[in-house]
Structures are given as structure tokens and as C-alpha cells.
Image (spheres, rainbow, N blue to C red):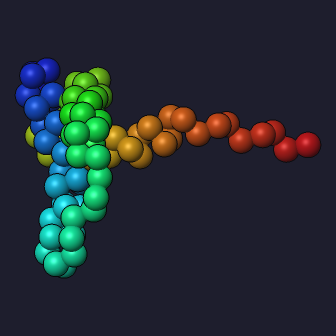
């Protein structure tokens, strides 16, 4: 895939978990959480662009893999930021 296609599929994958989370809240009939919607929208936009950029770095060979990389961005960051375990004494 070209870089532009990878970026777009990664952005779709980045926004998918949040869309599903809101769909789940709405489908149960619960009220939407009271958030600072302006700040939330800005952070979500940065996150989606970052998901697209990370997807370009992974260079997926299909749209489904691009969506998967974008959606698994939190797990990728969690793995990369974990501290190395201490050596046994």
C-alpha cells in the first residue's frame, strides 16, 4: 500500500475504538460522560493522526492490517514504554 492509504486506514483504526465505546454507551441508554469536549476532541485528533503515522511506519500490506495497527496503538505504546525487568540476583 502507498503511504497515504496506510495513513488513512490507520486513522480509521485509531478512531474505531472510541466510536465503538460511544456506541456501547449510547446503545445501553446511559448518558454520555461529561467531558471537556473541546480538549477531548483535540486529544482525539492528535491520537488519530499519530495512529496514521505509526501505521505508515509499520507499512501494512492490506487495509485490514492498517486498521489493526491504528486500533492497537495503545497496546504498542504500552509495550514500548514498559521498563525492562530487573536481572535476578
Q: Report the quarter where the N terminus lies.
A: top left
Image check: 13 left or right of 4?
right
Q: Nearer the viewer, residue 36 or 56?
A: 36
Residue at the (19%, 61%) spot, across then down: 22
Image spot of residue 60 (x, y percent) = 20, 33
Q: Is residue 17 visible to us here?
A: yes
Query: Toward which corner of the image does residue 26 lie, by quadrant?
Result: bottom left
Query: Toward which corner of the image does residue 33 lie, by quadrant?
Result: bottom left
Query: Toward which corner of the image does residue 66 lie, by quadrant?
Result: top left
Residue at the (23%, 46%) spot, across then down: 37
Q: Report the quarter where the C terminus lies.
A: top right
| Residue 88 higher or lower than 22, as above or below | above
Q: Residue furthest top?
A: 3
Q: Nearer the viewer, residue 55 or 42?
A: 42
Q: Is residue 69 visible to us here?
A: no
Q: Nearer the viewer, residue 53 or 88?
A: 53
Q: Residue furthest bottom?
A: 28
Image check: 31 left or right of 8?
right
Residue at the (78%, 40%) spot, across then down: 86
Residue at the (21%, 64%) spot, across then down: 32
Image spot of residue 39 (x, y percent) = 28, 38
All told, the count of numbered labels is: 0
Image spot of residue 11 (x, y percent) = 17, 36
Amino acid at each position: 500500500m502507498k503511504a497515504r492509504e496506510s495513513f488513512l486506514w490507520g486513522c480509521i483504526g485509531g478512531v474505531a475504538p472510541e466510536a465503538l465505546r460511544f456506541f456501547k454507551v449510547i446503545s445501553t441508554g446511559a448518558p454520555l460522560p461529561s467531558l471537556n469536549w473541546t480538549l477531548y476532541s483535540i486529544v482525539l485528533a492528535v491520537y488519530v493522526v499519530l495512529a496514521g503515522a505509526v501505521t505508515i511506519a509499520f507499512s501494512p500490506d492490506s487495509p485490514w492490517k492498517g486498521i489493526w495497527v491504528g486500533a492497537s496503538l495503545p497496546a504498542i505504546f504500552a509495550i514500548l514504554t514498559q521498563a525492562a525487568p530487573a536481572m535476578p540476583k
